[in-house]
Amino acid sequence: MSSTLITIERFLLEQQPHSAEGDLTTLFYDIALAAKMIAKQTRRSALLDILGYEKTTNIQGERQRKLDVYADEMIYRMNDHTGRLCAMVSEERDDWIPIPANYKKGKYVLVFDPLDGSSNIDTNVTIGTIFGIFRALDLNNRGRLEDCLRSGKELVAAGYIIYGTSTMFVYSAGQGVHGFTLDPEIGEFLLTHENMRFPEKPTYYSMNYGAYSYWDPGVQAFGDWLQTAQETPLSARYIGSLVGDFHRNLLYGGIYGYPAEKKYSNGKIRLLYEAGPMAFLAEQAGGYGSDGYGSLLEIKPKTIHQRTQVFLGNREIVQKAEEFIRKTNLSK
Ligand code: AHM
Ligand code: MG
């Protein structure tokens, strides 16, 4: 924990000059500003009668909540005209988003889930925003689908905003993971967690055991091992909010898993704008992200909303999941 007051802007400019050069820094400012607007609206959502469903359905076949739509709009509007991006992808929109022809285009691609874990909104439980930033493949183009369909290992930066008891902005530009907490009185994100690392000793496992009977046998064997075969048993914590579950496990050590199951035969989590950025952050914090067979960062999405099985957290435990899954496959 830092004892001096360092704003996110100052940190980027002074501590991370390599990532602070030009557009990337200002892109972070814009995302942080959108995050403040979303945080404000999230806190007041019940008062503003903003809860409940929109009439529209998103590409995932899920009814959109009003706050999802607001968050999507905020991030889009903060970034469409700045000249820093050439394309965006949002969980809430069917297609990739080009930059309007009347605006200058930039060299980065922003992919995001504006409000993840949104089934938690009505119950006042933690939700989050997830984002990833890629460099465009060809700077001469205004942005194309292929600039968006990228593997996690190509990420220049990634991060999340957690709307919990306080609002935090956690990001990595490839030089460690750093966390900033919003002081709502002054409206600034202040550095509170410099160089976050998974503690060596894990504390929690976070998977929905309600779906156990639908998991593959290898995942079931891993699930059993998590519950029984530990010297010091881990504790179960699952709130069904990837950002919240990941953040807690980053601070205390552990694993988050969303295995393939009956309803989501390829897993539920989206590769491009959820699993990829989280795996990037996990690796930057000394952990690992896997689809159960290998690194999530190696998988190139074929479609922007592609789903994947996911295991994220302390490297040894995630590798244990791979071990169980591999063993069961071989014995088939
Ligand atoms: P969403 O993108 O529709 O909000 O869904 C993603 C969320 C994750 O944050 C969370 O871990 C998972 O879905 C919870 O799903 P479930 O309720 O099936 O456990
Ligand atoms: Mg989501």
Image: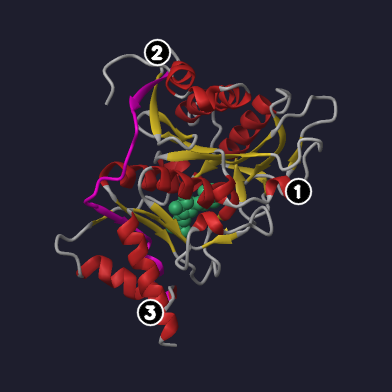
> Magenta part of the protein: which range?
188-213
The answer to whether mark 1 is within 8 Å of ligand 2 is no
| Dots 2, 1 in contact, CB < 8 A | no
Question: Where in the figure is residue 250, as x and y percent of width and height?
Answer: 33, 44
Q: Which mark is residue 169?
A: none
User: Which mark is first along the chain, 3 or 2?
Assistant: 2
Q: Residue furthest bottom?
A: 332
User: Residue 202 magenta-drawn?
Assistant: yes
In the image, residue 200 sits, relative to residue 319, either above or below, namely above
* SS label for mark 1: helix
Q: Mark 2 highlights which residue?
A: 185
Q: Which mark is residue 327?
A: 3
User: Which mark is first along the chain, 1 or 3?
Assistant: 1
* SS label for mark 3: helix
Is residue 32 in sight in this rendering? no
In what quadrant of the picture does the C terminus appear? bottom left
Q: Mark 1 highlights which residue?
A: 145
Question: Where in the figure is residue 291, as x and y percent of width and height?
Answer: 48, 63
The amino acid type found where label 3 is placed reads: Lys
The amino acid type found where label 2 is placed reads: Glu
* Distance (Cα) linking label 3 and label 1: 37 Å
* Distance (Cα) linking label 2 and label 3: 53 Å
In what quadrant of the picture does the N terminus appear? top left
Relative side of 204 to 27, left or right: left
* Distance (Cα) linking label 2 and label 1: 41 Å
* Residue at the image point whose x is 14% and y is 60% from the top: 232
